[in-house]
Each structure stands twice: as C-alpha cells, then as structure tokens.
Amino acid sequence: MSGRADQIVFAGVSKFYGEVLGVNRIDLAIGPGITALVGPNGSGKTTLMNLLAGLIRPTEGEISVLGVPPDRPRELCRLLGYCTQFDTFPRGIRGDDFVRLYLRLHGLDAAAAAAGAALAIERVGLTEAAGRRVAGYSKGMKQRIKLAQAIAHEPRVLVLDEPLNGLDPLARAETIDLFRRFAGEGRHVLISSHVLHEVDDLADRVILVHGGYIVAEGAIDGVRDEMAEERPLQVLVRCDRPSVLAARLFSEDHVVEAKLDADRRGVLVRTGDADRLLEVVRQLAAAGELEIDALLPADEDVQSVYQYLIGGDAQGAS
C-alpha cells in the first residue's frame, strides 16, 4: 500500500482478538489538524491508535502513516509520537531521564538528548518537577511527562489516548494550546477524549466510534447537517415573553415542538427549518412583541450528535 504522504490512511482495516471484535472494516483518510476519536469504553478507539502506532497488526486491511506502513517500525517511530492512557514507568526513574533516555534511543548523543528533554519538559510545564521520581508524581503530572516524551523528537504525527485525564483546569488549557500549536504547524494530532464539550472547541474533525465501527465522521457541524432531515434541530430562544413566542410558534408548520425552558425565561424549539424559525423571531422582535436576549443551538455538539447516532447516553463516552 502506498498511502499519501500527507494523510493517515486506514483501508478496509479489521482487528479481531480471537472471536472478539476490535474494529471492523475501517476506511479513513485523516489529514493534518486535530482529529478527535469519540466513543464509549470498548468502542475501538484504543485499538485504532495501537494499530496506527504499529503495536498490533490488523487481521485484515492496510494502514499507512504519511506514506509509511506500520511494519517499518524504525521509520514510523521517527514520524510518530504516542502518548498512551496507561501509566507505566521504569521503577525509580526520574522525569528528565524518562524523556532523555527516549531521545537516546532515537540516536541523539548525550548532550542533544539532555537539551531535547529539557525543552519538551518545559513545553508541558513540568520543569520544576523534572528531577523528581515519576512514582511521586500526581496523575496530571504523569500525563504531562508522557506527553513530553511523545513530543520530544518533534514528530509529525501525535497520537494521544485520553491526554486530558487528570489535568487541572490550567494545565488542561495549556495542553490544549500546545495541541493547537502543533496542528497550526501542519502536523497531525489524533486525540481520544471523553471531555466532549472540549472536543467541540478543540477538534477540526470528529470520528464517532461505536462497537468497533465508524458511525460518523467529519466536522461536527457537517455531521449535524447530514442529520437535519432525520432529526429536527433544537434551538433555545431566550426572551422576555416566552409564552407569546411559544403561542406563535405553534402555528408554524416547520416547528415540531415548542416548550418553555425550565426557568421559564426561554423557549426550547425543535424545528425542521432553522432559517424560517430565525425569520419568525426577527419579525416578532421588529414588531416590538418580544425582546430577544439570545438564540442558541441546543444540540450543536458532539455529545448530542453521538447520543442520536448510537441511541444511548454519550455522557460517559470515552
């Protein structure tokens, strides 16, 4: 398989663990930027990442990482950085040595490895703790030292399995900013996350995984648009006279449902035509019948789309 040099490609990839399905018939082409894998535990996200990193082999199908197949491990390791969700470290190792020794394995001499490790550790905000043993780190610090190792050799592809777990709000914001900088440099950043509201803001593209299959992929607004005919859009209209608005909307044929919000300061509307809804609201506001405070999409996010696609609760998706 000769994949494109600017894409990660899965072509007809399946992985079975005996009779247990890992992933099945996966066809994907992932370009530069931030791509999020979203799905509940056991959905196949980690299997996809391990296949991509060459840690496991597909039962069938082919994979290419910027033109390099996973069965060429030396080339792949130079190209790819992998931060797993598992905390496994050599006994007694310090944070700086964990990253430095990794760079030595990449062929750097002692001085270059020490300098590269210091830079990577600084980028994840862990310089002050670099000389301490990793065993004494918090969960969030362990996450960051793993990330430092993954980025230390300046890979073109970053594979990050639940990288935001355990991070405090400040560290999480700084880490997300680091991912965005990597993506802005034209790199590929593949992230799995259960923090769905952050996926909305972070990812350029979302891949929704369930039961070993890809159930949807693309920009989240594009995925939502594809569903528009099957599922009415939900919009929350905040206004000073919600009962007046609700009464008017009941006469509109594009409105499936209109109900007062829990605090009775707005109307939650389900509509098959958002443009017509917006026009009605504008007319009422122009006529002085309402003062509109806000008009907000109520389901333009990964969680609601995922709930719809799998018919379950996406709150615990990971």
Image (spheres, helix red, strand yellow):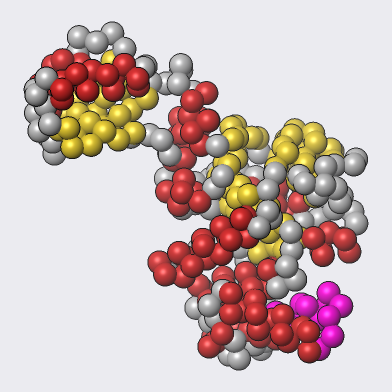
**Picture coordinates of residue 223, whole percent (x, y):** 53, 30
Magenta stretch contains residue 105: yes
- In the image: residue 190, left or right of residue 56: left
Given residues 224 and 308, the one toward you in this image is 224
Quarter of the image holding residue 298? top left
Given residues 114 and 46, the one toward you in this image is 114
At x 53% / y 30%, what residue is drawn?
222
Residue 247 position (above or below residue 299): above
Instruction: Provide the residue span drawn in magenta.
Output: 99-110
Residue 316 in sight = no
Residue 113 position (above or below residue 46): below
Magenta stretch contains residue 251: no
**Picture coordinates of residue 42, whole percent (x, y):** 60, 46
Given residues 192 and 127, the one toward you in this image is 127
Residue 82 position (above or below residue 108): above
- In the image: residue 5, left or right of residue 215: right
**Picture coordinates of residue 226, whole percent (x, y):** 52, 23
